Image: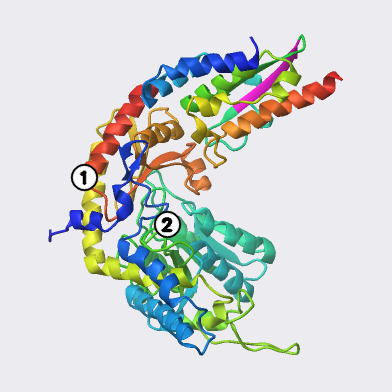
Amino acid sequence: MTHYDIHSIRNDFPILKRSVNGKPLVYLDNGASTQKPQSVIDAINYYYTSQNSNIHRGVHHLSQIATDAYEVTRRKLKSFINSKEEHEIIITKGTTDSINLVASSFGDAFVQEGDEVIISAMEHHSNIVPWQLLCERKKAVLKVIPVNDEGELDMDAYRQLLNDRVKIVAVTYISNTLGTINPVKEIIELAHAKDIPVLLDAAQAIQHVSVDVQALDVDFLAFSGHKMYGPTGIGVLYGKEKWLNAMPPYQGGGDMIKDVSFEKTTYNELPFKFEAGTPNIAAGITLSFAIDYINSIGIDKIAQYEYELLNYATSELLEIEGLRIIGTAKEKSGVISFLVGDIHPYDIGVILDKLGIAVRTGHHCTQPLMKRFGIPGTVRASIGLYNTKEEIDELVKGVKRAVSMLS
Amino acid sequence: MTINSIQDELIEDFSFFEDWMAKYEYIIQLGKELPLIDEVYKKPEYIIKGCQSQVWLHADLVDGKIIFTADSDAIITKGLVSLMVKVLSNHSPQEIASSDLYFIDQIGLKEHLSPTRANGLLSMVKQMKMYALIMQAENK
C-alpha cells in the first residue's frame, strides 16, 4: 500500500495532542463528529479577521470577497461529489436539515394521500422522523425495509416493497451504528426501474469512501461538514436539477427571492431558491479547507487505510471473551459496535472515558434498530483518518479492563 | 445519623482512594448493596427518565421516614443510585426535600451531575426530592 504518513497527519490535528482525565486522548467517536485540521481552524480565524461580511447581497469589497469564498466551496463540493451542475449543490445546516428539506418540499409536491415512502430499519432518526412527519401530514404510508441478523438490508423484501404508490426511497449509504455499506447502486437501479427517486443519507459515507453522484445516478444526497473534518452548522443537499426545479421552496426569506411584493413574490433560481437567510458563512467558507485537506491525502488512500484499521480492530476486539460485534455485514466501513456479555454499554463507556478513550454508547439515534436487535444500545468505536493501530490497542486494553471491573 | 453526617462520612471514605479505578470499584461494590426494588414495581411509572440505562426507583413512607428501593441494568448507575439511597433513605420527607447534596461534587463525581442525556444522576436526585415533597404534603 502506498505510504500513508500517519504521523504527519496526526500533527495536523492540534486537539489530538491533548489529554483527558490525565491520559492521552484516544478519539474514537468520529461517527459523532470529527476533529479539525489546523488549516480549517486557521481559516475560521482568518474569515473573522479579514473577510467577514454578509454574502450575496453587497457591492462593497468585503462582501465580494466573502461571497467569492463561499461560492468556491460550492464549486469544490461539486467536484468532490462529481455533481453535474454547481446549482445542484444546496448548502444547508447539515444532514438533518437537508433531509427535512426534501421531506417537506418534495413531499409537498409529490406525495399524496395513500402514497408510500420507503426507508429502512437501520436509519438514523434524522432519516426517519422527517418522513414520519410527512406521512402524518399527507396521510401517506411509511414502509420499512427489514434488516437481517448480520445488519444487512433484506433486498428481497425491498424488491417487494417497490410498487406504483411509492414516491421516494430514503436510505443510509453507510450505517452509523452497524457500519454496513448498503448496496446503493442496486437500490437506486431497482427504484429507477419503477421511476422512483432515491435519497441517500451520506453522513457516514462522505468521509470514508469516494462518492460520485453521477455514477450512482442518485436523486438526492445529504451530508454534514462536521463529520468530514469541517466545521459544524453546515451541510449539503445534492439534488438532481429536475427535482429541485419541480419542488416548491422550503423556507422563505431573504436570498431565496427574486421580487417581493404583497401581491406576489417570485423565487430565485437554483441553488438560492433553497438557501433562505444568512447562512453560517464562516462554516461555508471553511468547509472548502476540509475538502482540500481530504483531497491532499486522497479519499481512496483514506478508505484503504481505514479499511485495514477496521479489520485490525475487529480481529483484536473479537479476542475479548464474551465480546460480540453488532453489525457483521460483509461490506463495512467506519464503525464497530459491540457488546460484552450482559454488561451494559454505558458502564463500559464510563470506564473507557476514565482511560481517555472517547467512544459512544447508547442507541446512536437508531432506536428502532436497537429494538430489532433486542439490545439497550452498544459501545461504538468509530474510526477517522488520524486514528492508529496503537489507539486500537489502547481501546482493546481498556475494554478488557472495564470488563474485569464490571464482572 | 443525619443526611449531612452520612455525606461527610462518604467524603472521608472516598478521600482514601488514590485513583479513579479504586473509586469506581467501590461504587460498583456499593451497587451490590443497594436495597432492591420489588420486581412488581419494575414498571414504566417507576423509571427515572434521562438515563441511558434503565433505573427504577420506589419510595415508601414508614413511620414518618422515606425508605427508597431501586435497581438499574447498568452496574455503575446501580452504584450511583446506591450512593444516593445510602445518603437519603430512612429520613423524613422534610429532611430529604431540604437536603443539599454537596458530597457528589466533593467525592469527584461532578461529571455525573451534568444534565446530558447519558446520565440520570440529576434526574435521580430530582425524583427522590419529588417523592419527599409529595409525602411531605400528604403528611400535612
- Residue type beneath disc 1: Lys
Q: Which picture quadrant has residue A268?
A: bottom right
What element does badge 1 sit on?
helix
Q: Is residue B113 above or below residue B62?
A: below
Label 2 in the same subunit as label 1: yes
Left or right of residue A153: residue A384:
left
Image coordinates for residue B116, horizontal then vertical, percent: 54, 42
Give the residue drawn at x 54%, y 77%.
A275
- The span shown in magenta is B56-62
Q: Which picture quadrant has residue A109?
A: bottom right
Residue closest to the eye, A181 or A339: A339
Label 1 marks a residue whose chain is A
**Residue A197 can be seen, yes or no:** no
Image coordinates for residue A236, horizontal then vertical, percent: 45, 70
Q: Nearer the viewer, mark 2 or mark 1?
A: 1
Picture quarter with the N terminus of chain A:
bottom left
Q: Is residue A45 above or below residue A239?
A: above
Give the residue drawn at x 55%, y 57%.
A128
Q: Is residue A12 magenta?
A: no
* Secondary structure mostly taken by the magenta-highlighted segment of the chain: strand
Label 1, on which residue?
A389
